[in-house]
């Protein structure tokens, strides 16, 4: 299990960096300047950097499946609420900080990628993770992922609850069927991209990859689903699906082994733990760095690259700092208060 954790850490850290660099290539005036010298690199980052989200989807499914593996899910709503309370408190803090960064930089950045000044209803929709469903403009580049993550987790625990009275085979087959439906139909139409069914192909592959170690039957279900994924790629090739498939296969075939934890591997583990915070906060850093660039009136591509590298390092550092000083304390406080509330409600009942 130790080796598996290291594998997941590497996937999360690498994917997180690609997402940050993708957004640096998509937003900000430095990207336009760097394109003058490195057009192919910037085009590659813009077009393919975003695909790293598929790695997060697979790993997210993998970790969620481990949390419910061989367990009876009798209260799915309780688990969903816990997941909501795990995701949303820091998400709202990140949105508040990004909104402040945007307000400070609005006079210097005149671009359509900058979010509009938020309304109370817009912020409330984000708090409920309903912004896309209700048609509100996103306040951050990562807002959509948080909503989809909750949808996917809710779908998984509901399936586990529905089949809790049976053996594990039925829930594995149910997840596999949803994967196939997504890969062959729903994932081929962007009309579904605000719903879990659009992403469940990648997420479900991660779930099945985690369960593949559970039994021979689960391993057979995974490989059959992987084969059907290849068929879906033959019908309509999608780079995002091929990356999700490769990631899930690697999680299954990667052999376990003894790991000697070095300082570098411990740092890697910390970076992996802070990946969610990095995902949520880096957009604010991009806004502030872009504001700095515009006000300085620089035009040199090499200086733009240097400032972008500096901004990337600031994103990573801020992610580590906010994870340890804000997200973890917030999670502990919310968890403690929610347990106290549940205890009082149970006592009164």
Image (cartoon, rainbow, N blue to C red):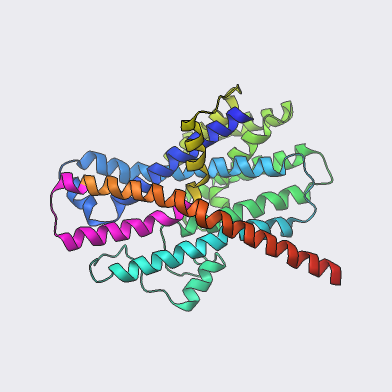
Residue that extends furthest to the bottom in the rendered view of this protein: 120
Quadrant of the snapshot with the N terminus: top right
Q: Residue at x 77, y 50 (%)?
A: 73
- Magenta stretch bounds: 277-304
Give coordinates of residue 14: x percent, y percent.
43, 38
Q: Is residue 20 visible?
A: yes
Give the camera-side residue of 236 and 170: 170
* Residue 176 against residue 263 in the figure, above or below: below
Give coordinates of residue 243: x percent, y percent.
46, 36
Quadrant of the snapshot with the C terminus: bottom right
Q: Which of the 4 image quarters holds residue 84?
A: bottom right
Judged by its main secondary structure, the magenta piece is helix
Q: Is residue 152 left or right of residue 188?
A: right
Q: Which residue is drawn at 68% across and 43% down?
A: 67
Q: Is residue 300 magenta?
A: yes
Q: In this view, does 213 lie to the left or right of 182?
A: right
Q: Residue at x 54, y 68 (%)?
A: 127
């Amino acid at each position: 299990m130790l080796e598996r954790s290291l594998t997941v850490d590497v996937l999360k850290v690498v994917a997180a960096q690609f997402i940050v660099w993708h957004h640096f290539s998509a937003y900000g005036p430095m990207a336009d300047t760097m394109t003058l010298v490195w057009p192919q690199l910037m085009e590659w980052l813009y077009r393919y950097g975003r695909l790293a989200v598929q790695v997060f989807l697979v790993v997210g499914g993998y970790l969620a499946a481990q949390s419910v593996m061989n367990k009876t899910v009798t209260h799915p709503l309780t688990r969903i609420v816990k997941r909501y309370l795990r995701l949303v408190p820091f998400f709202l803090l990140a949105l508040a900080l990004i909104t402040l960064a945007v307000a400070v930089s609005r006079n210097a950045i005149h671009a359509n990628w900058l979010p509009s000044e938020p309304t109370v209803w817009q912020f409330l929709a984000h708090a409920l993770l309903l912004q896309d469903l209700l048609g509100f403009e996103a306040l951050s580049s990562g807002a959509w992922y948080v909503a989809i993550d909750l949808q996917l987790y809710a779908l998984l625990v509901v399936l586990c609850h529905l089949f809790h009275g049976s053996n594990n085979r039925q829930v594995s087959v149910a997840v596999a069927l949803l994967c196939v439906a997504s890969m062959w139909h729903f994932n081929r139409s962007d009309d579904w991209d605000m719903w879990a069914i659009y992403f469940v192909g990648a997420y479900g592959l991660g779930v099945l990859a985690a369960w593949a170690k559970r039994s021979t039957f689960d391993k057979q279900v995974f490989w059959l689903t992987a084969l059907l994924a290849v068929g879906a790629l033959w019908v309509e090739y999608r780079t995002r699906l091929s990356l999700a498939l490769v990631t899930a296969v690697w999680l299954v075939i990667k052999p376990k082994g003894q790991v000697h934890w070095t300082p570098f591997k411990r740092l890697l583990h910390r970076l992996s733990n802070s990946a969610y915070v990095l995902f949520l906060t880096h957009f604010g850093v991009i806004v502030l760095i872009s504001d700095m660039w515009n006000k300085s009136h620089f035009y040199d591509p090499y200086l733009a690259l240097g400032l972008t590298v500096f901004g990337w390092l600031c994103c990573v550092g801020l992610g580590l700092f906010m994870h340890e000083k804000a997200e973890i304390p917030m999670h502990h406080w919310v968890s403690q208060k929610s347990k106290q509330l549940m205890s009082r409600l149970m006592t009164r009942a």
